[in-house]
Amino acid sequence: MSVYFSGCFQRVFGTYPLQGQGLKSAVHTAAEVGYRAFDTAQWYGNEAALGDAIRDLGVDKDELLITTKVHPENMAADRFFASVEQSLRDLQLDAVDVLLLHWPPGDRSVEPSLSLLQEAHRRGYTKHIGVSNYTSQMMRQAVKHLDVPLVINQIEFHALLDQRRLIQASGETGIPLASYCSVARGEVFNYPIFTNIGNAHGKTAAQVALRWILQQGVSINTMSTKRVNMQSNFDIMDFVLSSVDMARIQLLTETNYRISTAQVTPYAPTWDAPLD
Ligand SMILES: NC(=O)c1ccc[n+]([C@@H]2O[C@H](COP(=O)([O-])OP(=O)(O)OC[C@H]3O[C@@H](n4cnc5c(N)ncnc54)[C@H](OP(=O)(O)O)[C@@H]3O)[C@@H](O)[C@H]2O)c1
């Protein structure tokens, strides 16, 4: 079973774009709410701030799940390991729990950077390895290439985007999925269906949007600066959406609203087409 599906790690607190004191304050509030899994990246420029925040939490590091991601510019043999060693120093850890490749190399071959990731695992820099922003085809290529299992493919996943091809690939390859932009950075709140369904359960629109993700076997990353929203995003284990409500929300994926487009990031591969 993937580490993200044990205990409370199905709900990860994301740290982008938090920095400095704002990050520390948010991480401490999130820990009070109950979060024990935290997600950062070399790209976010906040690993040192997260390291300080974790040190001062008063929670045993063994109880935490810390994920970081290698920046695409560091995915060459002469930079990869030095960059991970710097991440470990910044995070004040001997090893991270999960090391991800932040982006695939566009549409180029995934094998070289996967080999570097596997070598980082062999060297003991990380307990587990994973990827982010992989397409379904890349997931299939990865399992053929690697000896070590990938514990996650962290991808944009929310109710306004059809990602059923990734769900299929996850079933085939055994690579679990985790969401980011789980409330589409607030865009889902423009659709009254979430509030309407939530009213029947005594739950918020955000909780319905997140529960819809979770019920597809996808673990969740969310970020908030507000305690009330952190609490809302955490309290999603005590209700169940009916198959009818799941299907009604699924219809919204036809919107195909994608945040991580090639315009936003030069590393974006050609994404999976929606399922017919
Ligand atoms: N792997 C990747 O390439 C990648 C890309 C993007 C993000 N990520 C990771 O995923 C994490 C989450 O993604 P994200 O932050 O981009 O998107 P997100 O979670 O969809 O959106 C965050 C925004 O939604 C608001 N929000 C959160 N919970 C809410 C709630 N219950 N009610 C109302 N508003 C709410 C927050 O505002 P308030 O502060 O006002 O609550 C914040 O502005 C990031 O922090 C990062 O760790 C990874």
Image (cartoon, rainbow, N blue to C red):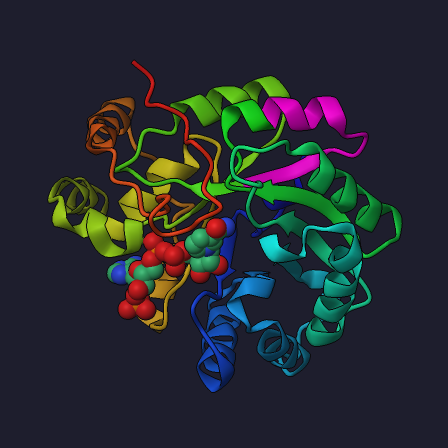
Residue 124: where, in percent of width, then height? 86, 54
Residue 60: where, in percent of width, then height? 72, 70
Nearest the camera: 191 or 162? Answer: 162
How many tags in the picture? Answer: 0
Decide if residue 40 is in sight here.
Answer: no
Q: Is residue 238 above or below residue 217?
A: below
- Which quarter of the rendered picture does the C terminus lie within? top left
Residue 56: where, in percent of width, then height? 64, 83
Which residue is at 78% across, 51% downward? 77
Residue 147 magenta-highlighted: yes
Kindly indicate the quadrant of the structure image that contains residue 239: top left
Which residue is at 79% across, 57% downward? 78
Which residue is at 29% across, 23% downward? 243
Residue 28 magenta-highlighted: no
Residue 180: where, in percent of width, then height? 43, 48
Which residue is at 13% across, 42% downward? 196
Q: Is residue 229 left or right of residue 28?
A: left
Residue furthest to the bottom: 21
User: Which range is magenta?
Assistant: 139-153
Kindly indicate the quadrant of the structure image that contains residue 126: bottom right
Quadrant location of ligand 1?
bottom left
Q: Is residue 2 left or right of residue 221?
A: right
